[in-house]
Amino acid sequence: MAQTAQSLNPARPPEAGHSVKRYTGLMDWITTVDHKKIAILYLWAGGFFFGIGGLEAILIRIQLIKPMNTFLDAQTFNELITMHGTTMIFLGVMPVIFALMNAVIPLQIGARDVAFPFLNALGFWTFLFGGLLLNLSWVMGGAPDAGWTSYTPLSSTTYSATHGVDFYTIGLQIAGLGTLIGGINFLATIITMRAPGMSYMRMPMFAWTTFITSAIILFAFPAITVGLVLLTFDRILEANFFNPATGGNPVLWQHIFWIFGHPEVYILILPAFGIISEVIPTFSRKRLFGYSSMVFATILIAFLGFMVWAHHMFTTGLGPVANALFSVSTMLIAVPTGIKIFNWLFTMWGGQVRFTTPNLFAVGFIPTFTMGGVTGVMLASAPADFQFHDTYFVVAHFHYVIVGGLVLGLFAGLHYWWPKMFGRMLSETLGKWTFWTFIIGFHLTFFVQHFLGLMGMQRRVFTYLPNQQFDTLNLVSTIGAGLMGVGMLIFLWNIFITSRKPADAADDPWEDGRTLEWTIPSPPPEYNFKQTPLVRGIDAFWKEKLAGHKSMTPSEPVGSIHMPSATILPFVMSVGIFIAGLGFMFSRDTFGSEVLSFLFNNYIVTGLGLVITFGSMLMRSLFDDHGWHIEPEELEGR
Amino acid sequence: MATEQHSQEGGVKHRHRHEGPQRHIVVFVFSVLLTLLAFAAVAAGGVNATFAVILLLVMAALQVVLQMGFWMHLKDKGHLLPIVFMLGGFFIAGTCIVMALYWVWWD
């Protein structure tokens, strides 16, 4: 598949001409391996889960609107907070990040697709089925209720007797497989498929952050994979990894979880940094200030991100030396992050700044994220953390960096690249309404939570007593959450009315596009670039514009373009893993019906799922698919 | 510099010359010898246990280097990125091992 990068394939067999299967409708979406369509799938699926996570957040805030509220009971509340965190991080924002990466990265580096289009589809479908499995828990005996961190022993069968946490371990395992596949795919794509002339130090910043993010995924996800396997074995096969009574150690889970979990927050925020680094130069009509220091800062953040995990565990009793070391390494991260903040400010300095919707979100991002960073440094101080730990101060902190950082960044990116993805400009008026309602709602919701935390309100409590000074601030917080919901609804309305307009966006709809994705039609044709462009410097398109050119210099003659074939195998493989996971989860249960007991207790359901998955792999290996070609005549005809 | 870097990566395939099997055979024999030595050190019985463990670990590390360098081509030109990512992997794995030993096993 890697040869999709080169349009000319001299070893092409003559019969590979046009025996191409083309599907329409639903089958087209299920079988697609086109990165642009997979991006849209990621966006809809991620948006769907984001909506579920948002509804859970609203329910949580309604419960906390007044003291001693009885809107939800404690068990439901625990399930809601667990699923809100898990859904938002793994199934909401990460897929939307992958949506933007898929939509933009091949275009930005001048490639015709990702390195492994088949794997790209597989990554999406495993994520989707993992996410569906996790959310099935709501209707199959109760959702996970041990928090998104799922600390042992709370998540052991002793304290979580239902299948909730099994849905968590198996669902996340399957979804995590998709993330790992996606990460490896983007590493290979960026290393091998950059257009001629695009050296590493000429890559757009979003391509850089995607590259580094993918590297973090590659190194961090194995840790959670192992952790989830150990927890699954503890729960289903009665292993004792985290059971102190039999020689296990519950703190081991915390270590494994945070060795993954802390890099995970950089997996989330670095793409947002990349988006902001694209949007701000475009709407300042200036090149990014300090490009090489931005690259350096990104790499440094990724590196340091692996050495700070124990700051989540200051109160577990690691001892003063370890606490001091992890304090210092955590505070160090503020240095490269600060470099980035100043670089964005200096990019705007003296630029011709246009406050379009994407730029509003980007400019709103800077102070909001900085506030989250400042509370991060406060939390990094171990003695202070003993006071802050498990209070609403922590809740406020991580919502400032994730919502105020990542989600604002995603909004900026979605508004910015929407015309490239769908060929239609989102309404600027509604976009500005989205921005103002969302950001005001956001600060109303979470700014007051700092003070709730400092006054002693603990996180994860389902209610609180009156007259502890918590009442008013919680009311304000809930009103803010409602306002954020209104902002989301305006965004959805914007998408809806935009989808009914004609797809007439220009190639370069913002008129100041700097990178390669703005040199091709919106939305791009399935082969992206008729001729692979020649990159002559950083901000390749802007450089051509300055030289008075209307388009890029091609690096090759018009020739036939090799395309990957559509296939349903990734979908089938993911269905297989889904069935296997579900079968394994219930393998020790007693069922009313004998048939069910027979099927599940003898691992027949699990086996069937694995046969489907591995059978599909075998099919993929045995039957070669050489793809198909688009001929130059067709290119001219379009 | 930029174009140099690119052509370096793109051109590796063509400049790669075949070294013939000699070196691989030498490495293979050496690996087998290392393995035999490891078994012999334990089977002989006379070796101090601590010394045997250290010896085995050193020989294991040597095996890893040989495998990576020769059979996985990390010694060849144009393998900077695989080496960087390998080292990254070793670093993270090492972190996990230190964590597990220092805070979980011996604690």
Image (cartoon, grey):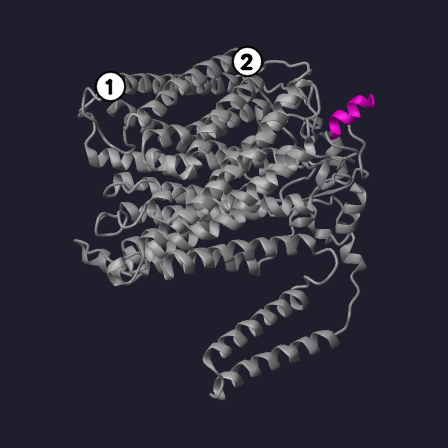
Q: Which residue lies furthest to the front in this view?
A: A320
- Report the front residue among A221 and A386: A386
Q: In this view, does A21 lie to the left or right of A476?
A: right
| Extreme residue in the top direction | A429
* Snapshot quadrant of residue A586: bottom left
Residue A521, percent across and down?
67, 26
Whether residue A141 sits left or right of residue A504 in the image: it is left
Identify whether B6 is placed above or below B55: above
A199 in the magenta segment: no
Residue at 42% x, 42% y: name it.
Answer: A311
Residue occupying image coordinates x 64% and y 50%: A1
**What range is drawn magenta here?**
A540-550
Magenta span main SS = helix
Look at the image and tell me in which quarter the C terminus of chain A lies.
Answer: top right
Instruction: Label 2: state its secondary structure.
Output: helix
Distance, label 1 to label 2, CA atoms, is 38 Å
Describe residue B28's horizontal placement relative to residue A66 as left or right.
right
Q: From this viewpoint, is residue A34 visible?
A: no
In the image, B2 versus A558, the foreground residue is B2
The circle on residue A428 is: 2
Residue of label 1: A471
Q: Which quadrant of the view contains residue A535? A: top right
